[in-house]
């Protein structure tokens, strides 16, 4: 993609973003009341208490816990003036949400109903002696419920997102990918709309639990497939694009839908009859830290940098496709991918290099620019489109 073409793409993205904001502001707001169910149901679906081991890290009631996640959702959906109040009559909990569309309760009810499938699967896994003492059932709470732009398919949420932050999108993984979306023209405040996450293992677990969790997927098949249907097909009826992050997730796509999807490979799945969903394969957002680790190359920093640059190019390309398809879901997925490859791996490869050295190697912008001008790095940039080295990697990635 030439600079002129890239400028046109950014202008189109900006225009689409502006129109979306104007459309959102014109939506008639209402007061919505949602019956969440019994205290027992809400307790299990909201992982309550989120962070208590005799002493509670945050002394929140069940109602306050639910309010926390629902407040995150309305903000991420763009309803900045909406208010949330959760009340209990002892038998049921009710969520009163003001300043949202009258239909807002529908996706919330769907999420919680589908969450029951996850709870049932977790119970069966526990009965089979497969549940670990350090795991928590954790649904994707607090994300945009209505105004989603794209779907991210991941492995499992880190436990600290639940226990420390009570925020599903507060993790090193999601933070890094949000930065890549910003690099591709998405305003920071709007990145949550693109990060509608489905974890194929709805289990908050320590970061080293990846290999163990690979054996639990079959217990959550009903939950997984229902979530994919609901998240990729919003009320508008236009299928949202999906990015499949990491080898466990890409393998799951193969086993569940029969489609092989490599890194920067495209596939089409049909989770709902008659509704095709475009899927792009990607590295796990955290893979770059592994691929660019000099320890993987006997301490050879130059080799580690060369590998890291290739992964950075792939990641920026994937985020570019996600941003473009999220803004214009009716676009041709292959054409969008080709434009993104050309931009980040050819036309603007020096920018790719600079972003790698500032975000991964923690250099200053001036230091990164100087590094990218050196002969060895310039040579690596000529090979940016070549495949990254295959490493024996952590199964989480």
Image: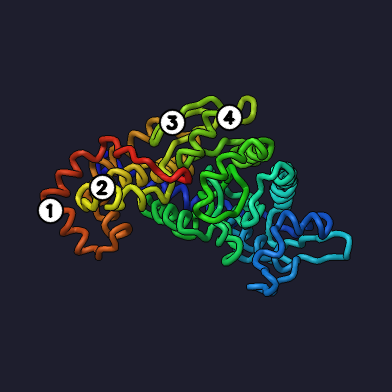
Instruction: Indicate which label's residue lies in the foreground, 4 or 3.
Output: 4
What is the CA distance from the residue labelled 2 to the residue labelled 1?
21 Å
User: Which is nearer the eye, 337 or 83?
Assistant: 337
Measured in 3D between alpha carbons, the distance from the residue under mark 3 to the one under mark 2, in whole angstroms, is 30 Å
Please name the residue that numbered disc 4 is placed on: 256
Q: Nearer the viewer, mark 3 or mark 2?
A: 2
Which mark, residue 297? Answer: 2
N-term mark: 3 or 1? 3
Marks 4 and 3: CB-CB under 8 Å?
no
Residue 77: x percent and y percent? 59, 55
| Disc 2 from disc 4: Cα separation | 35 Å
Q: Nearer the viewer, mark 1 or mark 4?
A: 4
Coordinates of residue 344 in the picture (x, y in percent): 29, 44
Residue at (28% x, 38% y) in the render: 342
Residue 236 at least partly seen = no
Find disc 3 in the rendering and name its residue: 266
> Can you identify the residue that label 1 sits on?
374
Q: Where is residue 267 in the image (x, y as percent from the top left)?
A: 47, 29
Can you say whether 161 is above or below 326 in the image? below
Relative to 159, residue 271 above or below: above
**Quarter of the image holding residue 369?**
bottom left
From mark 3 to mark 1, how far is it between C-alphas?
34 Å
Pointer 3: residues within 10 angstroms few (<14), some, or many (20+)? Answer: some
Q: In this view, does 348 lie to the left or right of 222?
A: left
| Residue found at the very far left of the displayed protein | 375
């Amino acid at each position: 993609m030439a600079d002129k073409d890239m400028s046109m793409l950014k202008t189109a993205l900006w225009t689409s973003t502006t129109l979306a904001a104007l459309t959102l502001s014109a939506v008639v707001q209402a007061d919505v009341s949602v019956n969440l169910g019994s205290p027992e149901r809400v307790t299990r679906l909201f992982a309550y208490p989120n962070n208590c081991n005799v002493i509670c890290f945050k002394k929140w009631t069940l109602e306050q816990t639910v309010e926390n996640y629902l407040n995150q959702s309305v903000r991420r959906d763009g309803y900045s003036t909406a208010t949330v109040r959760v009340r209990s009559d002892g038998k049921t909990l009710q969520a009163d949400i003001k300043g949202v569309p009258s239909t807002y309760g529908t996706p919330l009810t769907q999420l919680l109903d589908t969450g029951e499938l996850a709870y049932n699967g977790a119970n069966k896994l526990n009965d089979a002696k497969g549940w670990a003492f350090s795991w928590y059932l954790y649904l994707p709470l607090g994300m945009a419920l209505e105004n989603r732009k794209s779907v991210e398919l991941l492995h499992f949420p880190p436990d600290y997102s639940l226990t420390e932050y009570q925020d599903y999108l507060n993790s090193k993984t999601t933070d890094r990918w949000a930065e890549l979306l910003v690099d591709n023209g998405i305003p920071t405040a709007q990145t949550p709309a693109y990060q509608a996450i489905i974890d194929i293992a709805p289990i908050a677990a320590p970061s080293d639990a990846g290999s163990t969790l690979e054996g639990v997927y079959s217990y959550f098949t009903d939950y997984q497939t229902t979530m994919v249907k609901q998240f990729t097909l919003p009320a508008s009826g236009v299928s949202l694009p999906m990015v499949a992050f990491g080898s466990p997730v890409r393998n799951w796509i193969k086993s569940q839908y029969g489609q092989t999807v490599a890194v920067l490979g495209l596939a089409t799945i049909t989770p709902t009859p008659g509704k095709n969903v475009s899927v792009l394969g990607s590295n796990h957002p955290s893979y770059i830290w592994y691929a660019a680790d000099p320890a993987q190359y006997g301490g050879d920093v130059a080799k580690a940098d060369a590998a890291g640059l290739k992964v950075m190019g792939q990641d920026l390309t994937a985020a570019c496709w996600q941003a473009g398809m999220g803004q214009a879901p009716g676009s041709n997925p292959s054409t969008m991918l080709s434009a993104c490859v050309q931009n980040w791996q050819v036309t603007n490869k020096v920018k790719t290099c600079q972003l790698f050295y500032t975000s991964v190697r923690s250099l200053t912008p001036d230091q990164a620019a100087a590094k990218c001008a050196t002969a060895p790095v310039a040579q690596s940039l000529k090979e940016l489109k070549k495949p990254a080295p295959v490493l024996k990697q952590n199964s989480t990635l």
